[in-house]
Image (spheres, rainbow, N blue to C red):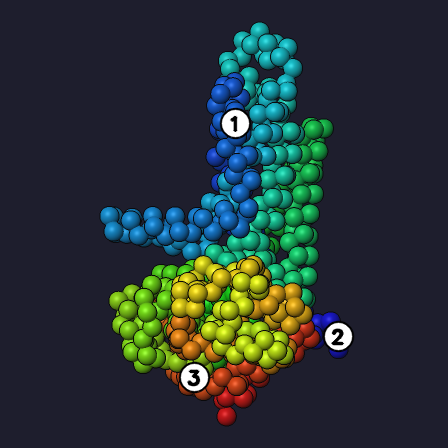
Amino acid sequence: MSLLSDPRWSDAIGHLPDYLGNHVRVSVTALLLGLAASFPLALMARNRPVMRSVLLSVASIVQTVPGLALLALFYPLLLALAALTSRWFGLGFSAFGFLPAVLALALYSMLPVLRNTITGLQGIDPALTEAARGVGMTPRQSLTMVELPLALPVIMAGIRTAAVWVIGTTTLSTPIGQTSLGNYIFAGLQTQNWVFVLFGCIAAAILALVVDQLLALIESGLRVRSRIRVTAGIALVAALIAVALAPSFTRMKSSYIVGAKTFTEQYVLAALISQRLRAAGLPATTREGLGSNVIFEALVNGDIDVYVDYSGTLWANQFHNAGIAPREKLLAGIKATLAQRNVTLLGELGFENAYALVMPKARADALNIHSIDDLAAHAGTMSIAGDYEFFARPEWAALKKAYGLSFHEQRQMQSNFMYAAVASGEVDVIAGYTSDGQIARYGLTVLDDSRHAIPPYDAIVLLSPRRADDPKLRAALQPLLGKIDIATMREANLRASGTDAESSPVVVAGWLWNKIGK
């Protein structure tokens, strides 16, 4: 099989124009915004020691905040601000993806620009500024005609550092809904598609290196006073940006956007929905790797058009309902609450993917553990692992309250890695998913939730307010409703958890349709 005929490589290359264009768009906007804020502040602070100290201290503190945390913090802040502006002025804006990413990355870019601008201006020989004033220059003329030209190489070095930082950190913007080269990395980690992970890392590294070298050309031109180098560097940077952004201007704006959360099943279902839309002649793109709260708010605000959620997640995590209702009553309650947000519950896919406590069957049998009640007596000496959000979810609180669970250790890890970890004895118990095929692969057993602490988790298709009355979308998705049983979904998830070319979510989605579409 040739390199390009491998579905994983061809799939990765196919996504490159979209991912690279969005990555460059966010990076350039954030860097320009950071420059627009930090450069004037540096000029004001250069001769004011107190202001200079405060600015550099604040910028340094921002740098200590992990990039993913900084990006995530802006989303709820902008979401609240958007709600206020809509209520007070009737003007709303999207808090999803682009805006929080740009604002967070702009803050991230400020320290090197502030520091190098101040350092460059302060490093100028005082005799030169005295000479400028001696020949009758005003302070403004001295700054623009003498000081800034001399400091520009140092300032440019700071811009180079900021650009590399921003390009690298932009890969972390995927979880808040901004498409970037990070989509390769997040999707690859979740589906164990190491081709995607490698492709994303290499693409981001090459982009950062190319931009750094082009900015270095401008910097060297400023140092040796070479207009040719400066002009060539600027022209090449502009050309790179234009080439990266060109596909964004030619892409159809009417594309249906299919959302996906951060685990394998979601990637498969998003690929399946996208394939069904395209088969019906509807242009479709996916936006993957979104957290539960982020993806729902994105749907409500029309930033995505359709995605698959789970009834228990909406009931407990999104709508904060206490207690558990019978399945039909729970679905009816969810449907009514969704209607208040103008979200349409199109229907159920036919299977349930609930959280469940899982451990190796051999060890469970040896300890006579068959239910969570049995587990409670041993939990104090055991460790448990869950995905990144499980221990902050109400389901975990409900389990602890219902069974009095208290584990010796709690660990968080990638959802796909949990199964191998519990099978190898790295942890004793995991919070797994009932539709995951890896339960059978690793010889694991699901412990009985006899007290029904965990609500039903029927997979349901949700439509955004703007797509509620879209007959073409409904017709394209109708053949999926009620057709995917738990056994079929487990097999699809098992296929997608492999590491070969056939485990690509796109390939598995095609297999799934062949299985249910007859």
Write down the residue under mark 3. 350
Considering only order in the chain, which callout, 1 or 2, is on the residue closer to the N terminus?
2
Residue drawn 68% across the image and 48% down it: 210
Considering only order in the chain, which callout, 3 or 2, is on the residue closer to the N terminus?
2
Discs 3/1, front: 3
- Amino acid carrying label 3: it is Gly
Write down the residue under mark 2. 2
Say which element carries label 1. Answer: helix
- Nearest the eye: 218 or 188: 188
Q: CA distance from mark 3 to mark 1?
A: 60 Å
Q: Where does the image place residue 98, in percent across and percent down from the top left?
A: 46, 53
Q: Is residue 247 above or below residue 348?
A: above
Q: Where does the image place residue 109, in percent across and percent down from the top left?
A: 55, 40
Q: Residues within 10 Å of mark 3 (few under 14, many from 20)?
A: some
Is residue 9 toward the left or the right of residue 335 in the image? right
- Amino acid carrying label 1: it is Ala
User: Residue 42's mark?
Assistant: 1
Figure quadrant of the N terminus: bottom right
Residue drawn 53% across the image and 50% down it: 68
Q: Is residue 225 above or below residue 327?
A: above
Q: Residues within 10 Å of mark 1 (few under 14, many from 20)?
A: many
Residue drawn 46% across the image and 73% down it: 373
Is residue 157 toward the left or the right of residue 435 in the image? right
